[in-house]
Image: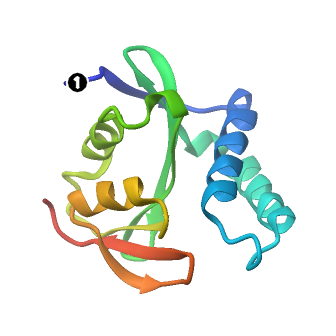
Amino acid sequence: MTHGISFEPADLSDLDAIKELFRETVEKHEDAESISFDEIYAWFDRKLQKHVRDFERIRSDGRLCGYIYIHEYEDGLELDDFYLLKEYRGRGIGTEVISARISTLEIPVYLYVFKCNEAAFHLYRKFGFEVIKDLGTRYIMKRSRIV
């Protein structure tokens, strides 16, 4: 089933929505004893202020369903942030987004994923990402080939 996925640039009006999706992800998956939430939120706020226009809004049949941020990294690209609103998860939209944005790239793509985020981990494995480093609560994954 296709969901009419489309992309458009994010802007300053998206700051609060992206921050909330980041907070939700961190609070659900990060080990509260190993990091300072205040520090990680402050870091993300700085990053977002600098790069919000590099994020893309993801739309499904015209409705806002999430955000994605991909940028140059080492010898390829990094899928830095990828968020879907709760009501759009588990419907195949993530698969369509990854397919549209990275499946045909012939350069390495890197990402960080929380170990306990099983749905995201399995999605990335489906597209050929492999764990290259264990960071405790997260993995660094890399996709070197087209799947």
Quadrant position of residue 100 = top left
Q: Residue at x 75, y 70 (%)?
A: 32
Left or right: residue 132 versus residue 81 is: left
In this picture, is 5 found above or below 39?
above
Q: Secondary structure at mark 1?
A: loop
Question: What x and y, as percent, mark residue 48?
Answer: 71, 50
Residue under the image location 76 percent in, 48 percent down: 49
Percent position (x, y) of residue 3?
29, 22
Residue type indicated by callout 1 = Thr
Vertical placement of 108 versus 62: above or below? below
How many numbered circles are shown? 1
User: Is 111 or 34 nearer to us in this picture?
Assistant: 34
Say which residue appears at 22% left-offset and 51% top-offset: 103
On the rendered image, what quadrant is the C terminus found in?
bottom left
Residue identifier under label 1: 2
Neighbours of disc 1 within 10 Å: few (<14), some (14-19), many (20+): few
Q: Write the residue at 56% across / 83% down.
A: 136
Q: Is residue 98 left or right of residue 47?
A: left
**Frontmost residue, 117 versus 19:** 117
52 to the left or right of 141 = right
Q: Nearer the viewer, residue 142 or 121?
A: 121
Above or below residue 34? Residue 112 is above
Is 41 placed left or right of 4 in the picture? right
